[in-house]
Amino acid sequence: MKNVVLNNISKTYDNGMVQAVSDVSFHVNQGELFGLIGPDGAGKTSIFRILTTLLLPDGGSASVNGLDVVENYKTIRKNVGYMPGKFSLYQDLTVQENLNFFATIFNTSVKENYDLIKDIYVQLEPFKDRRAGKLSGGMKQKLALCCALIHRPTVLFLDEPTTGVDVVSRKEFWDMLKRLKQQGITILVSTPYMDEATLCERIALIQTGSIMSIDTPENIITQFPENLFAVRSDNMGNLLHDLKKAKIIKSCNAFGAYHHVTFRDVSPEVKEKLIRVLEEKKHTNIELKPVTPTIEDCFIYLMEK
Amino acid sequence: MDTVIHTNKLTKRFGDFIAANEITFDVYRGEIFGFLGANGAGKTTAMRMLCGLSTPSSGTATIAGFDIYKQAEEIKKNIGYMSQKFSLYEDLTVLENIRFFGGIYGLSDRQLKEKSEQLIETLGMKSEVKKMVGSLPLGWKQKLSFSVAILHEPKIVFLDEPTGGVDPVTRRQFWDLIYEAVDSGITVFVTTHYMDEAEYCNRISMMVDGEIKALDTPAKLKQQYSVTSMDEVFYELARGAKRSE
């Protein structure tokens, strides 16, 4: 079953001057962990707000649990959980008060669904009497997730839950999502961090309101059409400059300790040719090796296509 | 080597809580210095002290040659600051923002005119000068806001997560700007959550629970922890952290 379906959804702002979402279609299967991967301004939040019935699309249709987002908004709201990108709980209520409040709004109690949030809530428990506004970033994130889950939603919408969060907390958060998925909850999550894409079952790469690719992360990587190489030398700044000027190089991007390049020519001699070019430019300790593309390589390729 | 930042046992206490605990390090002229740490490790507190915005509880430091206790105002004139959260005024135009910040940093009218023309030219923003900054794409805003932060040719520029949320191509263009600034003699002090960007720094410090737990070049840190990426170095160091903001 498809829990979330979007058919040619479009959204503009400022009387049509700003095209935030343009002709977006995808679906999320029941129990799937689906990622919307793209930078700020790609249209991720508009899509979330349309699906959570908080914003009307200009064109196209969308449904959640088989219910139309415009016609059946009241029913949808009872059955989905939404964690917005901006912290939106009551800052002047305590941890426990926020949780009780959201449970009550949905006609349930914390006790009734405690098993679902238990793993996350135990980490918050020492601070249960602290006001939400006084919590740390990581703790706010955990509380917001608990509040989005407390009515046992069938679909969970998480808009950039890990933005601005350090590597360790990000890893913990993704571990939590995997456990929720095991409970059968369908999860649509967005992130600007390309490295998080591989933690989803399927992903959509989105840029300036349009979807560039939808598939499993593995398939998107397999579809990268070029042979990709990693290059380094002792002077990485000059190397980047020289690679960009080299005629045999098609694309060149800095990637941490290495630069990633593709060649214009696929002949086996290109590697030796490049090393010769770089040696002429006085580069030392040159290393050139084939590498598997990352999602970020694919994203850049699709953006520049 | 010229030292532009020198700290010795710099400490900040809030009541019983020690946000930054005896941090000691030097940053050299023309360096890109990566200031990393988990959320709540004390990075913001340390940065606020280095910018002359917060008085330390104990320890000493000089920034661009000025004493952190006695010459905080001089420090502010000799540094630039940019963060993703606070950058430009959205409801002022591109030109108004440049003039406003240039004015704040003490440029004369003539310098302002000269500098703003030059800047608009290099950024290729001629047709955008009269547009509200709020209407520009995020990538442009960030490039503009960085350029504005170094308009007065500071000795050091502090960048607090400058590339958060931008697309991978713009993120790399932003680093080209950082390299240009370094070539012109500006020292760059930068925080980031992108570990590939940690690799672009000459040296990295890692803060955990208010203390600097590691400081070296990315290559040496990876060697020291016997790992292949900065991601793993970060994870090894930060996972033992007791506090999270």
Image (spheres, rainbow, N blue to C red):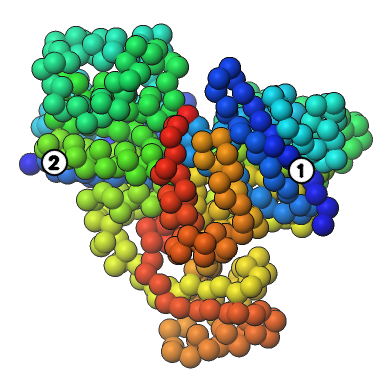
Side of B139 where A282 appears, left or right: right
Residue A92 location (% of width, % of height): 41, 8
The chain carrying label 1 is B
Residue B212: assigned label:
none
| Whether residue B80 is situated above or below residue A194 in the rendered picture | above
- The answer to whether any part of residue A298 appears in the image is no
Number of marks in picture:
2
- Amino acid type of disc 1? His
**CA gap, disc 2 and disc 1:** 51 Å
| Whether residue A135 is situated above or below residue A237 in the rendered picture | above
Residue B6: assigned label:
1
- Amino acid type of disc 2? Gln
Q: Which of these two is toward me, A163 or A2?
A: A163
- Residue on which the image places disc 2: A182
Residue pictured at 82% horizontal, 41% vertical? B64
Quadrant occupied by the C terminus of chain A: bottom left
Q: How many neighbours does mark 1 have within 10 angstroms: few (below 14), some (14-19), or many (20 or more)?
A: many
Considering every residue shown, the one lying at the far left of the view is A1
Picture quadrant where residue A154 is located = top left
Q: Which secondary structure, mark 2?
A: helix
